[in-house]
Image (cartoon, helix red, strand yellow):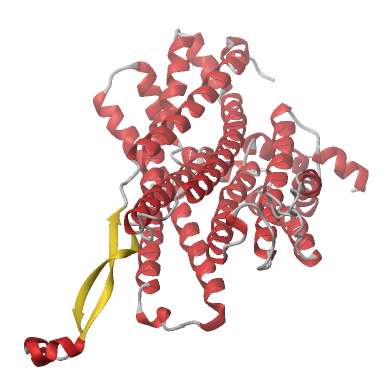
């Protein structure tokens, strides 16, 4: 097959295929941009002049690098989901190439070229956006202090590795997901999931939570306080946190299928509404559809809940420091905390928008794939309003418990490190006897072994239920808006003329 023919076949297809290419490009651009920003933060050297303490404090800078590394996880999950959008239609198109005489290797190349070129264009766009933003946002004040580390450029090998690694990862994932179509022209028939839905994948999430709790206990141990792990402690810490976060997200993504399955069975027992019954049966027929469709929204919600918990700890930390040192001025720290909070909200909003676009394409493709079934229901007398409510039910059955579980995972993961906030008091002291029990009991000897130590104040950090509830409501609102848009776009799918043979 000639290269020009392969390109033409790779980008041929329906509107869903073109939408998938566009969203894959956008997802790759976002992933590269986030990774380059993380590389910039990692490359910051002590002694830089910046107006925000976020880039000058070594401790805060380490925490910022860890947080940005974790925020790359939703971006990579979004890029992975883009490879699945429109999968049934693309599988049929590639299977048709096999029937027309294409070899398995040629089919693999067509899929790889489609995803690889789209991701490569997105990687170039993300790199260009990073460089352009670096130039536009470089605005030092009269003292030479910059609001952002725009004077720091990651090493060239790191930039190249990010720009090449993201498209390669997306291409490898696309080829892996399409391996059955490359084996046989009838590969689509073998991809239907009929096996029993099991609850054990959800244990990965519990393992992630246990990992966060273990890391917190390890950080408080004498081994770590005395310099355990040496100079590689920060790197090992970041890798361990990332591994726990990935386990948490995998448990959330894979466990949602079982939750949706159980919710659908419960709904069948509790309702007799036609729309709810149709949605429950569709969910039971393919419970994994929810885990694939809502992956990015669930991951984003989990990270958002963790960010809300971290913000609650920052507020409590300011309060305990102000109580311990009445002369301390908290205005600078409060402004710094507000800036961080605004940045996190902007990132979460951007990720929710990307997730909404992916969900819209997935729902439209699902409606197109089931157009004959929908048309048959309409021809049999089912009102279109019932089908519209059925789509809402089908979305909410896995989404509502999935979002609740995502909020709980995010809260508990971050709370492992932020259950309390402490600060040493500068005006309260307590008498401490450092001698033996007999020496401390003797008034004459007690004075020789008495010292005065500052009192440490400890405040419990409240759980930000209000903020998390607002985040969950925002995620559900985004889902409902996407469902409403998909219903408007799919009115033609319920036309009885779809029952005619192609």
Q: Nearer the viewer, residue 469 or 224?
A: 224
Q: Position of residue 165 (x, y in %)?
A: 73, 59
Q: Position of residue 312 (x, y in %)?
A: 39, 47
Please indicate whether residue 47 sits to the left or right of residue 348 in the image.
right
Q: Which of 339 and 123 is in front in this view?
A: 339
- How many marks can you see? 0
Please indicate whether residue 338 sits to the left or right of residue 182 in the image.
left
Please indicate whether residue 431 sits to the left or right of residue 410 in the image.
left
Residue 479 in the image: above or below residue 335 = above
Residue 389 in the image: above or below residue 425 = above
Q: Can residue 182 be seen in this view?
A: no
Q: Where is residue 48 in the image (x, y as percent from the top left)?
A: 69, 63
Q: Can residue 422 be seen in this view?
A: yes
**Which residue sits at x=38%, y=73%?**
218
Q: Toward which corner of the image does residue 494 lie, by quadrant?
A: top right
Q: Position of residue 33 (x, y in %)?
A: 71, 49
Residue 208 in the image: above or below residue 115 = below
Q: Which of 231 and 239 is in front in this view?
A: 231
**Which residue sits at x=28%, y=61%?**
457
**Which residue sits at x=65%, y=54%?**
176
Please indicate whether residue 497 sits to the left or right of residue 267 in the image.
right
Q: Toward which corner of the image does residue 357 lie, by quadrant?
A: top right
Q: Nearer the viewer, residue 443 or 285?
A: 443
Q: Toward which corner of the image does residue 368 lie, by quadrant?
A: top right
Residue 155 in the image: above or below residue 21 = below
Quadrant placement of the C terminus: top right
């Amino acid at each position: 097959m000639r290269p020009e023919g392969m390109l033409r076949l790779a980008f041929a297809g329906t509107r869903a295929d073109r939408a998938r290419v566009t969203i894959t490009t956008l997802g790759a651009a976002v992933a590269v941009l986030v990774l380059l920003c993380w590389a910039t933060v990692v490359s910051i050297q002590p002694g830089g002049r910046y107006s925000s303490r976020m880039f000058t404090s070594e401790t805060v800078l380490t925490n910022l690098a860890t947080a940005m590394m974790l925020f790359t996880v939703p971006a990579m999950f979004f890029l992975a989901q883009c490879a699945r959008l429109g999968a049934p239609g693309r599988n049929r198109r590639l299977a048709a190439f096999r029937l027309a005489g294409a070899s398995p290797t040629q089919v693999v190349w067509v899929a790889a070229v489609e995803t690889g070129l789209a991701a490569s264009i997105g990687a170039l766009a993300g790199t260009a956006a990073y460089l352009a933003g670096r130039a536009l946002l470089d605005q030092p004040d009269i003292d030479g202090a910059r609001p952002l580390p725009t004077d720091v450029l990651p090493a060239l090998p790191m930039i190249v590795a990010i720009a090449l690694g993201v498209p390669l990862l997306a291409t490898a994932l696309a080829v892996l997901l399409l391996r059955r179509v490359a084996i046989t022209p009838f590969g689509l028939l073998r991809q239907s999931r009929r096996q029993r839905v099991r609850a054990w994948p959800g244990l990965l999430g519990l393992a992630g939570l246990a990992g966060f709790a273990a890391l917190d206990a390890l950080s408080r141990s004498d081994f770590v306080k005395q310099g355990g792990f040496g100079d590689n402690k920060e790197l090992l810490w970041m890798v361990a946190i990332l591994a726990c976060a990935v386990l948490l997200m995998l448990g959330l993504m894979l466990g949602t299928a079982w939750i949706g399955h159980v919710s659908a069975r419960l709904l069948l027992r509790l309702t007799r509404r036609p729309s709810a019954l149709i949605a429950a049966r569709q969910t039971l027929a393919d419970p994994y559809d929810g885990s694939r469709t809502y992956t990015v929204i669930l991951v984003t919600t989990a990270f958002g809940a963790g960010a809300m918990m971290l913000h609650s700890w920052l507020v409590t930390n300011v309060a305990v420091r102000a109580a311990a040192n009445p002369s301390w001025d908290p205005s600078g720290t409060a402004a710094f905390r507000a800036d961080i909070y605004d940045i996190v909200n902007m990132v979460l909003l951007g990720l929710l928008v990307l997730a909404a676009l992916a969900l819209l394409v997935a729902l439209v493709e699902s409606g197109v794939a089931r157009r004959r079934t929908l048309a048959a229901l309409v021809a049999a007398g089912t009102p279109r309003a019932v089908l519209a409510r059925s789509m809402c039910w089908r979305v909410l059955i896995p989404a509502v418990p999935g979002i609740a579980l995502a909020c709980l995972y995010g809260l508990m993961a971050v709370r492992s490190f932020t259950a309390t906030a402490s600060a040493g008091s500068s005006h309260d002291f307590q008498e401490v006897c450092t001698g033996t029990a007999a020496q401390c009991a003797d008034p004459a000897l007690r004075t020789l072994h008495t010292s005065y130590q500052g009192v440490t104040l400890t405040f419990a950090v409240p759980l930000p239920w209000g903020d998390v509830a607002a985040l969950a409501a925002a995620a559900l609102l985004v889902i409902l808006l996407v469902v409403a848009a998909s219903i408007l776009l799919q009115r033609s799918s319920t036309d009885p003329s779809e029952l005619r043979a192609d």
